[in-house]
Image (cartoon, rainbow, N blue to C red):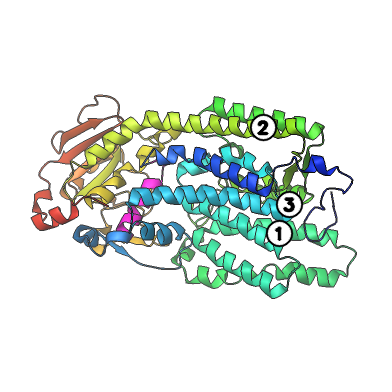
């Protein structure tokens, strides 16, 4: 292992190794074939579920529908407006609506999710190739981690940004000894792209570069310190365009909404490997630890010296990161999955021996199948509720106003309930409705609710009201602390009550009439609502089948 190589690469295997044994290793083409096959398997739960039960995903997908159709749908135009601004959360908004011009918005979302998976794995492979100077199959061990808790939350722009950051780090390593203008120019393009993915993704790139340049600073310690420091500081030049973009962005008004929490740091580490089943997570960890211990003991796994610098820098950043940054929750807990992919890219495995190669491929197959089966079985169980919910949406009149409420104060906390949290936003896609939980916070999204309806939706990404709060607010307003659901029977046509018990009673028969009692939800029509006042022409237009 070439510890002092300034290009952050490892020297090739010694020439003394017999060529016959070298030929037994997996070639770049073989690694590409295995990668594609594993990506197909990993994608099975996505392709078989048009609406994956991810927490924020449906809400994001409804925004894609509005962006793609607001100019030709009168109800969407009545409720919403798109205000394009330099917001660091736009990648999905720029890609999915374009794809939705030729396929349905559901298929466009699926394509985006699969592209996100491909970007993550290929980015880890590319970074590994840049560091070691040859193709390695070791980054394929990251496949089971494509499904993780952060993914279940539905942070799609951020996860897409992780893949882009891995590619950015790979390009930086490839170009490190090239002309400074080429290296800094390419890095600047990545920086701007990552800004529009997510600020956290841009931060991941910065953390990776910091670790790389600290390592380089050390390996070149025999050179004059002044020039090394200038070279080190110049790494930050590509990040300069992000400063005016952030200053021009409405996101800056959220800059003071930050707080740090000590508790939850361990949870963030667990989120990188845990999905639904603790048993499955334990099995994957046991397999990984056992396999790694066996390989290390036999000197089959090598770690690039950058690994240890990266591990230290990532650990410090994670501990220092606040829980909420720029009013965005899980600012720290979303980082470990990105750091794990970067660290995996810093390791290599010797597969020249036939038994080792077969054992490694078996390990990849088993771990991926454990994760895919876990996710697919769980999603199949959850599909009953999802199908019922999609069917209930068809009962809404086009152009309706929908209030979302919780039957329980802790509704949506369980990972199995994530798919229901924003399911009501399907009404935006299917019925061009106004839904109170739609993401429309200024500074976070380009989708805004028009001023005449802004007072009756959640503009702060808060928790929907409980039944108890609705009963209190049905006929009055709170002058001291007005809520968007005050006097709700006067403003809404339907109420979705989420996280209900089986055969739960109507909580307010005077104002609500039950339309559907589904699995963990109920749909009510508000008595005396003004849905019938929607012009028939608008109803027909908005109710046309989606492409």
- Percent position (x, y) of residue 524? 19, 37
Indicate left or right for 237 with 545 as reference. right
Q: Can you tell which quarter of the image residue 283 is in?
A: top right
Q: CA distance from mark 3 to mark 2?
A: 23 Å
Q: CA distance from mark 3 to mark 1?
A: 24 Å
Residue at 12 percent of width and 49 percent of height: 531
Which residues make up the magenta segment? 52-67
Question: Is 59 colored magenta in this rendering?
Answer: yes
Of callouts 2 and 1, the N-terminal one: 1
Residue assigned mark 3: 134
Residue assigned mark 2: 288
- Percent position (x, y) of residue 72? 23, 63
Q: Residues within 10 Å of mark 1 (few under 14, many from 20)?
A: many
> In front: mark 3 or mark 2?
3
Residue at 59 percent of width and 47 percent of height: 121
- Pick the front one: 451 or 274: 274
Which mark, by number, is residue 210?
1
Q: Residues within 10 Å of mark 2 (few under 14, many from 20)?
A: some
């Amino acid at each position: 292992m070439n510890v002092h190589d300034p290009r952050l690469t490892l020297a090739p295997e010694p020439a003394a190794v017999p060529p016959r044994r070298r030929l037994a290793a997996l070639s770049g083409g073989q690694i590409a074939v295995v990668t594609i096959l594993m990506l197909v398997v990993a994608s099975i739960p996505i392709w078989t579920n048009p609406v994956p039960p991810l927490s924020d995903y449906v809400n994001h997908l409804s925004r894609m529908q509005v962006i793609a159709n607001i100019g030709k749908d009168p109800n969407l135009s009545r409720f919403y407006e798109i205000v394009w601004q330099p917001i660091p959360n736009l990648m999905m908004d720029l890609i999915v609506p374009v794809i939705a011009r030729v396929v349905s918005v559901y298929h466009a979302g699926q394509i985006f999710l699969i592209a996100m998976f491909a970007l993550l794995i290929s980015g880890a492979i590319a970074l590994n190739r840049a560091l070691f100077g040859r193709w390695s199959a070791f980054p394929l061990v990251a496949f089971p981690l494509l499904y993780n808790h952060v993914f279940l939350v539905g942070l799609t722009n951020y996860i897409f940004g992780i893949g882009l950051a891995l590619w950015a780090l790979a390009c930086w390593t490839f170009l490190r000894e090239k002309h400074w203008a080429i290296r800094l120019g390419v890095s600047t393009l990545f920086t701007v792209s990552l800004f529009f993915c997510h600020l956290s993704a841009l931060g991941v790139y910065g953390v990776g570069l910091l670790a790389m340049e600290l390592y380089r600073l050390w390996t070149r310690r025999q050179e004059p310190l002044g020039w090394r420091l200038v070279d080190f500081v110049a790494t930050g030049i590509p990040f300069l365009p992000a400063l005016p973009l952030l200053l021009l962005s409405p996101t800056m008004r959220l800059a003071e909404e930050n707080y740090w929490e000590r508790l939850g740091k361990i949870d963030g580490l667990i989120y990188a490997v845990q999905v639904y089943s603790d048993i499955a997570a334990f099995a994957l960890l046991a397999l990984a630890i056992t396999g790694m211990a066996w390989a290390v003991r036999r000197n089959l796994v090598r770690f690039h010296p950058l690994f240890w610098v990266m591990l230290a820098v990532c650990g410090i950043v994670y501990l220092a990161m606040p829980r909420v940054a720029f009013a965005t929750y899980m600012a720290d807990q979303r980082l470990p999955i990105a750091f794990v992919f970067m660290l995996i890219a810093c390791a290599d495995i010797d597969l020249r021996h036939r038994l080792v190669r077969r054992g490694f491929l078996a390990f990849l197959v088993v771990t991926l199948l454990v994760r895919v089966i876990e996710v697919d079985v769980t999603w199949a169980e959850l599909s009953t509720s999802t199908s019922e919910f999609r069917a209930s949406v068809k009962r809404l009149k086009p152009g309706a106003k929908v209030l979302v409420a919780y039957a329980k104060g802790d509704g949506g906390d369980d990972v199995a309930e994530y798919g229901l949290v924003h399911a009501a936003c399907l009404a935006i896609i299917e019925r061009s409705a106004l839904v109170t939980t739609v993401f429309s916070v200024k500074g976070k999204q380009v989708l805004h609710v028009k001023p005449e309806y802004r007072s009756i939706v959640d503009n702060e990404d808060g928790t929907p009201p409980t039944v108890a709060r609705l009963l209190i607010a049905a006929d009055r307003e709170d002058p001291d602390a007005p809520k968007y659901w005050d006097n709700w029977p006067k403003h809404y046509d339907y109420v979705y009550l989420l996280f209900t018990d089986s055969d739960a009673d109507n909580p307010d028969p005077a104002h609500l009439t039950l339309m559907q009692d589904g699995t963990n939800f109920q749909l009510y029509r508000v008595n005396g609502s003004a849905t019938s006042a929607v012009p028939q022409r608008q109803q027909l237009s908005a109710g046309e089948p989606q492409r």
